[in-house]
Image (spheres, helix red, strand yellow):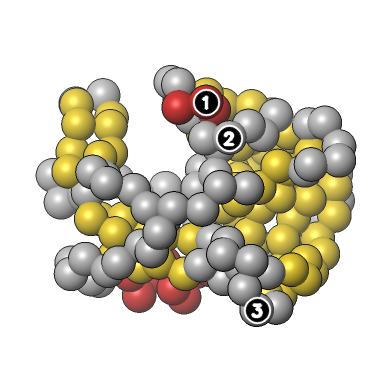
Amino acid sequence: AGVGELVVTDGAGRHAATAVHFDPDQDLAVLTAPTLQAPALPTDSTDLAPGATGAVLGYPGGGPLRASDSVVLERTTAIGQNIYDQGTVSRSIYAIAADIEPGSSGGPLLTTDGAVAGVIFAKSVTQDDVGYALIWSEVAADVNAASQRTEAVPTGACTTK
């Protein structure tokens, strides 16, 4: 939310991006970058059991891409407010043991096979090295629908938490 210029960076350089889906309840945005040639990562909608290992990818602190080990602690339903502290929102999430920092949000929770099983959206404010990921099966329909869109959607105002 509140971002100005959207850019996706890969080994080939920087690619202009457009937000084609934004949901403040899920804390999820989907971008399209037409000049990006990399294939999409595979996805996995099966439930991960506690103890399942994998990795998280992100850009902690706005720095370079970093991968960190992860372990699923539990699948749960989180009840709270959206990113604007409005309304009651229910999200199916994984609590994971992982090094999650600001800048990790939006990155994938990967299985050991390299498939996306979730999307990182928060770090615990009470426990070190614990973060939270939206479960892929809960966001897959929105992401798949957004993959067919090209028209920009507004992403709302910036929020700080």
> Of tags 2 and 3, which is closer to the observer?
3
Find residue 102 and name its label.
Answer: 2
The residue lying toward the viewer, choosing from 64 and 70, is 64
C-beta proximity under 8 Å, tags 3 and 1: no
Find residue 87 and name its label.
Answer: 3
What kind of residue is marked 2? Pro
The residue lying toward the viewer, choosing from 112 and 125, is 125
User: Where is residue 147 shown, x and y percent of the image?
Assistant: 30, 66
Neighbour tally class for label 3: few under 14, some 14-19, many 20 plus, Cα within 10 Å: few
Mark 2 or mark 3: whose residue is earlier in sequence: 3
**Residue 87, above or below 130:** below
Find residue 70 and name its label.
Answer: none
> Of tags 3 and 1, which is closer to the observer?
3
**Residue hosting label 1:** 61
Q: Residue furthest top?
A: 64
Q: Quadrant of the N terminus?
A: bottom left
Residue 147 appearing in the image = no
